[in-house]
Amino acid sequence: MEAALSNPEKIKIPVFKNRNFLFLLISALFSAPGYYVYLIGAEWLMLSISDNRFFFGMLFFAAAIPRLLLLTTGGLIADRFNKRTILFLSDISRVILIVILLGFIWSDSITAWYLLILAALFGISDAFSYPALNSMTPMLLEEEQLQRGNSFMQMTTQVSPILGPALGGTFIALLGFKGVFLIAAIMLLIASIAVLFIRLKEEKNEVEKPSPWSDLKEGLAYARKNELVVSVVIMAFFLNFFFSGPLAIGLPIMVKDIFQSDAVGLATVQTSMGIGALIGAIILATITLKKPGVTVIVGLITLGVLYTITGLSYHLYVTAGLVAAMTLTTQFVNIPLITVLQQSTEKKMLGRMMSFFMTVSTGLVPVSFVVTSILIAVGVSIQTIIVCSGMVITLISIYMFRNKKLLRFTLSKEGVSR
């Protein structure tokens, strides 16, 4: 178990004068955009080498399955080992994978199957980096700084859908796939180096650590006691099914097949996602939500309506605007939920709780990718899928007004008031 190298006066250190937190931000500033540069390159490469859109859907499924299966393991490891080391290994392994991909492209031997294998390996990396990253933030900041700190982390990571697709689309157009993947590898290399400057130390603990199985059982028992988290996870479990697959698979297909655009068009839509998310994170970094539970539910309803309208769009720039509005709204859902989870969880349990939240809430995401791919393969238009999904999300969100615990929760310096 680690603790930041700081003295009891750490509470006096402002967020932007916290050296360790700054290096974490810098790492995220390069890691997340680097990943998105790779992602837009992989998406467009798959669309270019295969006309079978089922393979394109499987690109997301291949990443989601190992991520889902290994997130719990990733949480256990994050609670037992050095989080800085985990983040470093995650980023450097991605660099190696992209270098191998460049070798296949250079030899003109790339196939759809290799892209699927690469996606699966990236999914494994995600399963270990996500719990480590999200459980490290509250170790570097005090509880009253968490909403602001999480907002800055979101701003940093959400630069990725702005900078990443913009760079990705531009370099695909100017330098081809070799250029876009080389940029991605360099950015991830810088991220891995920045992580090494974070100074963490292990707490001396003379008590023998329990087995991983005991840790897992303890984590699950701990999660079940938090009724608020359980209710939110169940909600996310179903919402992600209707949102993740149609959106991730649908936007690139709409750009290429319906809007008849190119990689720059895809970059435009995906960049708009980052712009909306960045604006939302900036807003939440400057305000304190008085009724975050109400904000979450209203945000979900708004998201469902915008999602439905997106499915009716036939214009690239209208879609980009709608997507920007959706991701802005998403921040008013995600940041308060992550913050309440962090504040209501003991630090020694953070890795397991973050992985539990991610694992259960995204449990149906791989199924969403498969169902969406199958529907497209049998002739259902992606726009019809998005419209129907948006309507279901709206109805589920309205039903959440019955969740009194979510409506009542508030964030405070001492923790969570319910």
Image: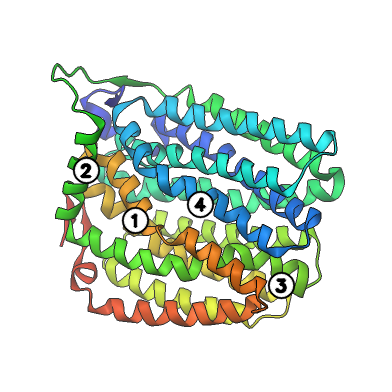
Q: Classify mark 3: helix, strand or loop.
A: helix
Label 3 packing within 10 angstroms: few (<14), some (14-19), many (20+) = some
Q: Earlier in the sequence, mark 4 or mark 1?
A: 4
Tell me the amino acid under the disc marked 2. Gly
Tell me the amino acid under the disc marked 4. Ala
From the top left corner, tell me how far across and down residue 109 is, in percent: 81, 39
The label on residue 64 is: 4
From the top left corner, tell me how far across and down residue 69 is, in percent: 41, 46
Distance Cα–Cα, label 4 vs label 3:
29 Å
Residue 413 visible? The answer is no
Label 2 packing within 10 angstroms: few (<14), some (14-19), many (20+) = many
Q: Classify mark 1: helix, strand or loop.
A: helix
Identify the residue at horizontal 30%, vertical 80% (top origin): 399
Q: Pick whichever, 288 or 48, lies toward us.
A: 48
From the top left corner, tell me how far across and down residue 340 is, in percent: 27, 54
Q: Is residue 123 left or right of residue 377?
A: left
Q: Pick whichever, 129 or 298, lies toward us.
A: 129
Report the residue marked by disc 3. Answer: 317
Q: Earlier in the sequence, mark 2 or mark 1?
A: 2
Report the residue marked by disc 1. Answer: 360
Distance Cα–Cα, label 4 vs label 2:
23 Å
